[in-house]
Image (cartoon, rainbow, N blue to C red):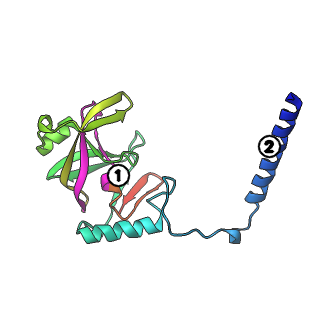
């Protein structure tokens, strides 16, 4: 019985390796054309043409397309990208975090903006490296980085010692493009 199982496993492995070899030898012209459907979490919104077109159109329709320019951010010594954001009229240093679903403000930064954090109801928890912490959601009037202004941005005040506020997808996904080449991040 064990011999049959090992024999079957060897055959499956050989077929898999053979199929991988055939796939890697495909000519560039053999590419399969895909549809314009955006599905799943596997596509990259920063480079997906349909998503970029939709986000630009949505931004223009909402009147929050910002300037026609771009913001260039340099990679810092700790390998992250930071920006000085004008959030509701207050300069806040933020770290770009494309993995964060929304803008996440530290308590200190939220209070600097003028948000009365203690009056906000706790609306959930945020999963951090240190565990789950309470979070309070708020709608920011404006987030602007070098003239790239987005209005009505969902954010959360996180009661944890994050050290720096995070610039998440509630801002980034409303831009036309976010690209990283080498040590430079370009926001458009």
Secondary structure beneath label 2:
helix
Q: Is residue 40 magenta?
A: no
Secondary structure beneath label 1:
helix
**Residue wearing tag 1:** 169
- Circle 2: is it few (<14), some (14-19), or many (20+) Cα within 10 Å? few
The mark nearer the N terminus, 2 or 1, is 2
Q: Position of residue 4 (x, y in %)?
A: 87, 34
Spatial CA span between label 2 and label 1: 41 Å
The residue depicted at 11 percent of the width and 39 percent of the height is: 116
Q: Are marks 2 and 1 in contact (CB under 8 Å)?
A: no
Q: Position of residue 88 (x, y in %)?
A: 15, 52
- Circle 1: is it few (<14), some (14-19), or many (20+) Cα within 10 Å? many
Q: Which residues are magenta?
A: 148-171
Q: Which mark is residue 151?
A: none
Disc 2 or disc 1, which is closer to the eye? 2
**Residue wearing tag 2:** 13
């Amino acid at each position: 019985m064990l011999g049959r199982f090992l024999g079957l496993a060897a055959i499956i492995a050989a077929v898999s390796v053979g199929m991988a070899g055939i796939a890697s030898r495909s000519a560039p012209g053999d590419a399969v054309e895909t549809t314009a459907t955006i599905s799943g979490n596997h596509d990259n919104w920063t480079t997906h043409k349909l998503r970029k077109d939709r986000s630009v159109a949505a931004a223009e329709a909402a009147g929050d397309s910002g300037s026609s320019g771009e913001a260039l951010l340099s990679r810092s010594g700790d390998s992250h990208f930071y920006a000085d954001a004008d959030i509701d009229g207050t300069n806040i240093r933020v770290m770009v975090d494309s993995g964060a679903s929304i803008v996440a403000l530290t308590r200190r930064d939220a209070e600097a903006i003028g948000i009365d954090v203690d009056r906000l109801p706790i609306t959930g928890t945020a999963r951090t490296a240190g565990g789950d912490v309470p979070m309070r959601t708020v709608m920011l009037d404006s987030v602007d980085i070098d003239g790239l202004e987005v209005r009505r941005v969902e954010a959360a005040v996180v009661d944890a010692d994050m050290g720096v506020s995070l610039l998440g997808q509630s801002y980034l996904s409303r831009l036309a493009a976010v690209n990283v080449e080498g040590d430079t991040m370009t926001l458009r």
